Image (spheres, grey):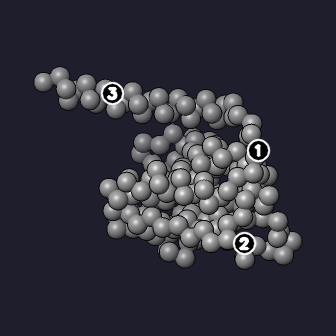
Amino acid sequence: PLMDPLSIVRDEIRRLEHILQDFLQFARPAPPSLAPTSISVVLDRVAGLLEADAQRRGVVLELRLANAPSVMADADQLRQVFMNLTLNAMDAAGAHGRVLISCDTESIALNQKNLIAINVDDSGSGISPEVAARVFEPFFTTKEKGSGLGLPISHAVITQHGGSIQVGRSPLGGARMRVLLPKR
């Protein structure tokens, strides 16, 4: 008879631990340990870690990484960023939705040819301009059980790597999170 209440307590402790880790990381971010890093390897790992969750949710998770160059980066920090962006996209896509992670070097402006773009697209309902203007603010969230720190932490990590994150409209109909990073 105590198993159900204890299970709820265990789940809440895990949730609070996750929020506490987010707070600590936001308060004192670790500097990146830069090394030559394959974007394809990082994103393959993210997809591998999230594939079972995507299947459980009924979301199609797809990678298109042709010609993805290497970058000077902290692979662990990039993995954390793309885990967060992909989980957010899976939440937005919902059951029977689609998430596409792709690399793009062709559409970069001529004055930015030293950059690679990694797009995380979803087939959800998109992000309104009002919400898009605030997504990188600490503690801002549209989720019932969110800390509002995932995107600000991701933004800080990418900025430390000399890159940027842009919010836009996805060709799949939902949101696009576009990460620009300097090529190696």
Determine the residue located farthest toward the left in the rendered image. Answer: 1
Image quarter of the N terminus: top left
- In whole angstroms, how far apart are the C-alphas of marks 2 and 1? 21 Å
Mark earlier in primary sequence (1, 3): 3
Is residue 30 depicted above or below 38 in this figure? above
Question: For residue 120, which quarter of the picture?
Answer: bottom right
* Residue 176 makes an appearance in the image: no
- Crowdedness of circle 2 by 10 Å Cα count: few (<14), some, many (20+)? some
User: Which mark is drawn over residue 34?
Assistant: 1
Secondary structure under the numbered disc 2 in the rendered image = loop
Give yes or no for contact between labels 1 and 3 (Cβ–Cβ under 8 Å). Answer: no
Which residue is pictured at 72% across the width and 77% down the height?
106
Q: Position of residue 5 (x, y in %)?
A: 22, 26
Is residue 125 depicted above or below 88 in this figure? below
Mark earlier in primary sequence (2, 1): 1
Of residues 12 and 143, the one nearer the viewer is: 12
Residue at which label 3 appears: 10
Secondary structure under the numbered disc 3 in the rendered image = helix
What's under tag 2, amino acid-wise? Thr
